[in-house]
Structures are given as C-alpha cells and as structure tokens.
Image: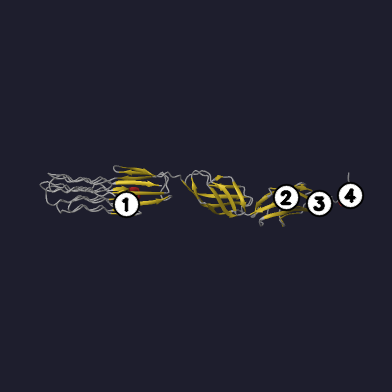
Amino acid sequence: MIPAQLLATYKPSYFVPTVASVSPNVGSTAGAASVTITGTNFTGASSVTIGGTAVAFTVVNSTTITASTPAHAAGAVDVSVTNPAGTGTLTNAFTFYAAPTVTSVSPNTGTTAGGTAITITGTNFTGASSVTIGGTAVAFTVVNSTTITASTPAHASGAVSITVTNPGGTGTGSNVFTYAAVVTPGSQTFDSSASTFTIPAFNTLTIEIWGPGGGGCGTGAANVSGSAGSGATTVSTLGMVANPGGGGNASTFTGGAGGTAGGGNSANASGNAGGNSGTSGGQGGASPNGGGTATPSASASQPGVAGNVPGGGGSAAHGTVTTIPPGGGGGGYARSVYSAGQLTVGAGLAWAVGTGGAGGVGGGQTGGRGANGRVKFTWS
C-alpha cells in the first residue's frame, strides 16, 4: 500500500503524443465533419488543432480522440494533439474540399440512345467521386479542377440535370443537357374522314391542311349552282382551320368564293375563287394542284371536271349555251411548323378533313365536284 504522503506528491508521467491517422481524412470547407484521430499517448490531451484552429474534442482513450472539423479554405492541413509532455503532429492529415459547381456542358444535346461524349465545365472538380447525368451515375475522367469528360447514358427525351460530387459536397447544373429522340423522317397524308395523329419523334414537324373545294355549276335548260364544300379541314388540337370553297353560283353567275384559313403559325392563305365564266374551279389555297378545268367546245356538251386534291374547286359543265356558268372555289390553306420540344412526342392531334361540294346537276351536264380537303404531317 502506497503511503498517503507519497500519493499526495505523486505526479503521473506523460509521453509526447503521436498522430498516426485521421478518419475520414477529407471533408467540406464548411467544416462540421466528425473525425476520429488515432495515435498514441493521448492521455491528458489539453489541445487539438486542425489546420491551426483549436477544436473541441473528446479523449476516448490513450489512442483515440474524436473531434469536429472547423471551416477552412480548401487544401491539406496538419492535425496536432498536445498534452503536458508536448505536441504530436501529422502533416497533411486532413484535406478540405470546396463543393463543385457545374456551369456548362458541351455538346448540350444528344440522342435518347445515349453514348454522346460530353465535356463538363465548372469549378472544384478535384477529388470528384461521382458524376450523374439525369440521375444515372456514369464513368468519368477528371481532366483538371475545371473539366470532366463523360459519356451520356440512355434516357428518355427531355432536359436533365448533371451533378458532380466530391468530399466538399455536390454541385448541380440544372437542365444543362437535353435528350432528343432518334428521328425517323416520314409523312402521313389524309384526304377524308377524321381521326387522331400520334406525334412521332421529330426535330421539325410540318402540318399542312387544305379546305375542301366547292362544286361547279351544271347546265341544262337552266344552269344549276354547285354546292359549297362540306365542313372545314381542321387540326383542332392546335386551332388550325381551312374553310371550304363556295359553289359556283348560277344566279349571280359568279365563281364560288375561296375558303379562308387560320391558326397556322407559318402560313394562312385563302383559296382562289372559281372562274366566273366557268373554265375552271378555283385552286386550293397555296396548293400546287388547281381546280378541274372544263374543255370548252361549241359543238359538244362537256361535264364539269372534278377539282384536284387537295382543295381544288370543281369546274362548271360546258353546255350548248353561249356562256359557260361559273366554277367552284378552292379551299383555304394553313401551315404550322414546330421544332423539337414545342409539342409532346406521343401526344395526339385531332384532325378532320372536309368533303368537296357536289357539282350542280342540270338537265344537261353536271358540274365538277370539288376536291376533298387534305391533312398532311411531315417530320424530319
């Protein structure tokens, strides 16, 4: 048993600490990372510094101390432990990292199939541990602190964000890359009825509509007016409309009026009026195909000729009368052009095609029928 007098004068022996490692050994410049310092002779520790800053700490035992990092500029720093016998220091024991920023991506578009080689530009990429594109982690190469190269994964069409993570945190570039679907060029044309067109993948989608043509007059003992085209041609989802041409008017001896059009974001044109003296029907608005044309003959009666698709007005019949009655008017025309992203791929566009007006039925020859309208979708 140690005498009380000796205990009163006893002073414990201390040895200079050594710092062997810090775990984790990386963290954010914002600080507040919990670390475990491992070494020897930590008993009696009176101070712990990280990067020269004294921090609060707990001596777990002679070989273990826990602490929390302070805020500090980016870079490697020393960690020191001091007790009555001296100070132990581990050089460059902990590295502070600033959080990355993502400022741009080049190229910033690619196909949904993936495989596009990209260069990501930003700051603080040193120590990057993860890169995601549209939420998918990808392989990458850190070229330098401001440049990373990677390859895009497959992804649905649309804009996506790219993130870069290092020990300092995660930087995000919001909607910096856009996936475009693989486009197979094509077209679809409808000359009757009504239905819905499903939008395919496209870079450019052109929609053209023609209204139906009006019918030409018929001849006989009395000339008979043609009928106007029945129903407008529409893509109602987009507000596009091409109105029908009017029928040749036997009472006023005037050609049918051309149909009007509206709702096209690229072009809207009215159809041409039918000929007053009946040699032809009116051409459909902005159409390469005109209305049908009668073959004038002083010696033989001729029926009217049907208007050509799309939207041509029918011609008047050629009777034995001196003056040929008027033809039908052409339908209106509208065109809209959309770039990728302006319409949703897979969505439906409701369309309807107007019907050409009947030619007048006289006691002699029947006027030409107006052509039906048309809807045409072309994509590339």
Amino acid at the residue labelled 1: Ala
State the count of labels.
4
Can you tell which of label 4 and label 1 is closer to the viewer?
A: 1
Which residue does the image show at 58% across and 49% down from the upper left? Answer: 149
Can you tell which of label 4 and label 2 is closer to the viewer?
A: 2
Identify the element where label 2 is drawn.
Answer: strand
Q: Earlier in the sequence, mark 3 or mark 2?
A: 3
What percent of the width, then of the height, locates residue 192? 28, 42
**Cα separation between marks 3 and 1:** 89 Å
Residue for badge 3? 16
Residue for badge 2? 58
Residue in the foreground of this view, choosing between 74 and 112: 112
Which residue does the image show at 15% across and 44% down from the upper left? Answer: 365
> In the picture provided, is 212 more to the left or to the right than 134?
left
Q: Residues within 10 Å of mark 2 (few under 14, many from 20)?
A: few
Residue for badge 4? 6
Amino acid at the residue labelled 2: Thr
Q: Earlier in the sequence, mark 3 or mark 1?
A: 3
Amino acid at the residue labelled 3: Val
Q: Earlier in the sequence, mark 2 or mark 1?
A: 2
**Cα separation between marks 4 and 1:** 109 Å
